[in-house]
Each structure stands twice: as structure tokens, then as C-alpha cells.
Amino acid sequence: MNIGFDAKRLYNNFTGLGNHSRTTIDILTEYFPENAYFLYTPKAPKMNDASGVGAYLNKRYCSTVTPNGLLKGSLWRTFGIPKNLKRDGIDLFHGLSNELPVGIRKSGVPSVVTIHDVAFRTFTDMYHWQDRKIYDLKWRHAVKNADRIIAISECTKQDILRFYDVDESKIDVVYQPVAPRFYEENEECESCKSELIAQNPELLGGFLLYVGSINSRKNLLGVVKAIELLPKDLQIPLVVVGGGREYKEEVKRYIAEHNMEHLVIFPKKRVDDEELRQLYGKAKAFVYPSFYEGFGLPVVEALLSHCPVVTSNVSSLPEAGGPYSLQANPASVEDIRDKIATVLTDDILCGKMISGGYEYAMNTFHPKVLAERLMSVYERVCK
């Protein structure tokens, strides 16, 4: 089968949507090497690009396709790709990040689109009204014209049904794959490999971890306030890995006003993938009481790293965290505090959370399982 993908995010986005695109291609090429994979992107990096994504230009079983006519950039991505699909003999096209090109249905090439979330409809205050209108048009066009829709969680599926006129039978739930390194055992060692921990010796006594964008939806301020309410003997540092702007400054102001600088550490340098694995593996708990997530990828990363998880009881997070994570009401600072305190004081429960959470994540989110589910969607469309 010749399968085409919208690879703009794969080559040009280095966080959520880009990671999803890359891991999707990784698991498909590993478990279904008999197919040919065509990566359509308006802009490709150089082979030796510092980000490492240039390696996909040479990836086995893959071909990268860029504009070669009058249409360039976003115009080609929106209007020009269907013509290339016919030329390249594509059997199916997959829009990996909420969008499909205009004219895809008229091209006669079957299509699938992955919808990650509908956050611009549920958290409108985080988006400019112009962006909300544009996103809504793109999402609406995609779900209307796709032969099948992939939702990355049951929660996202329900949001699609809530906001768009879509037949429920048209939607398949296929969870988001995690980067392959998280499925490999992270051998514990006596010497500390983490540069961050080496530079902050106070972390050797234990710390909490938050990983993700720093915005109001993800509720970092709720975590900080919960730590403030903990008994003094349970107040261990919180390491925050992620970028942000206005909301991050709001959190920092609260920390300064409440003399909590010694309890919250924002790494000064970018945390690379190997360092992140070390942090997950050494943290006393991963704390992620987000108000809304399309999936909640960091929760799964933590479970696969043998880290106990405190997350939310809303949105997709019960799906990501499973039965061995503690789930708090994200609107209740007291509930978040109580769940953190439980992890820090109940060693028996904590042990069950680590072993049970790892088993749940391996069984539910293993790349082979997800690749097979994804391929079954493709085969259903191409019957």
C-alpha cells in the first residue's frame, strides 16, 4: 500500500503534534515495512539539521515530497497536495494534525484525519477569536471530508461528536504513540546521570515533576498551591519542564510572593530526551492535574518510566493514567494536595502504582498495539 501523510508538523514542529507525527511514522515503518510511506511537506530541513528531524529524509520505506510547481508553502499544502497524490499512486492519505487539503475528496484518494483535541472550543480564553474561527473551519472541513476520523482518546471522540455533525460510527479511537525510548528499560544506576540533579543537590532528597506547556489549561499554579498546603515535612521541590509565557510569569509571581522559590525549579537549559527520562525515573511523583487534554502524553511517559502519577479525574486523563494513577479534581487545590501526600507517605500503595501503572501503559499503549490499530483503520478505508 502507498500511504501519504501531511508531514509539515513532522519536519517543522518539535513538540506535541510534531512528536506525534514522527512516532506514528516510526511505529508504522517498524511493524509494517511492506508499505511505502510518502511524507508531504511544504518545507523540509537539511539532512544534518540540528533538531535531528532531517534523518526522516533518509528513513527506510519513506519518501519525502515537497512542492515542485507554482504553488509553494501553505498554499501547496492546502490546495496542491491532492494533485501529487494521484501522480504518486497514493492509496490512502492521512492528515496527522487535524487538517486535510482542500479537494481531497474530489481527488478520489481515500483519506483519514487525526483529531487531537478541540481545546479552542472548550478553552476559548486561551485563543484569539481569529484563530478559533480558522481552526473551526479547518476541523469542520476535515471531519466532513475524511472517510474516517481518528480520535486520540475517547474524550476527544466525545468532543468531536459534541461540536461537529459527525456520525459516531465514522470515528475510531487510536491512542497516541509515545516515543520509542520510553518503552526501553531505563536502568537505575547509583551515580546520578541527570545534569539538573547534579546542579541542584536539594533534588537528591526527592522531588516532584511537572512536564508540559505552561498555560492555564494545564494548571501548574494548582500544583504550586497544593505544595504550599502540604505539611512542611512533605514539601519537596517541584521540577517544572516546559515553556510558557504570560501564565508562566503569573505562576512565578505567585511563587515569589509566597516565598516558594526554593520549592520550584525551572531548568535554565533545555531538558533533552535522555535527561527527561532520568527525571521521570527519579521523581517521587509526576503531578499533572490538567483541566483538559486531548490525550495526556506525559502521563504515559511517566508510567512507562516507573513513576507514580497524580493527574486529573476529568477529560482524557483517566484514560491515560489508568486505574493505578491517583486522580484529583483539578479545581480543588486541597484534593491535589491530598493525592500528592498519599503518594509521599503510603509506600505500599506507591509500589502498586509503579508496577500496575507500568503494566497498564505497556499493555494499552505499546507501539505494536497502536500500529496494528492504525493499520486496521487504513485497511477498513481501503477495502
Image: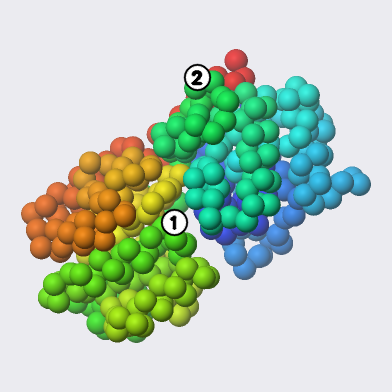
Q: Residue at x 27, y 51 (%)?
A: 329
Q: From where the camera sits, is residue 190 visible?
A: no
Q: From where the camera sits, is residue 15 visible?
A: yes
From the image, tell me which residue sits under label 2.
169
| Residue 237: mark | none
> How far is disc 2 from disc 1 in space, using C-alphas?
30 Å
In the displayed structure image, the side of residue 318 where residue 173 appears, left or right: right
Lower position in the chain sequence, tag 2 or tag 1: 2
Q: Nearer the viewer, mark 2 or mark 1?
A: 1
Q: Residue at x 36, y 66 (%)?
A: 221
Could you tell me residue 250's position as x and y percent? 44, 73
Q: Amino acid at mark 1?
A: Arg
Kindly check if marks 2 and 1 are in contact, taking CB atoms under 8 A apart as contact: no
| Residue 217: mark | 1
Helix, strand or loop for disc 1: helix
Residue 278, placed above or below residue 330: below
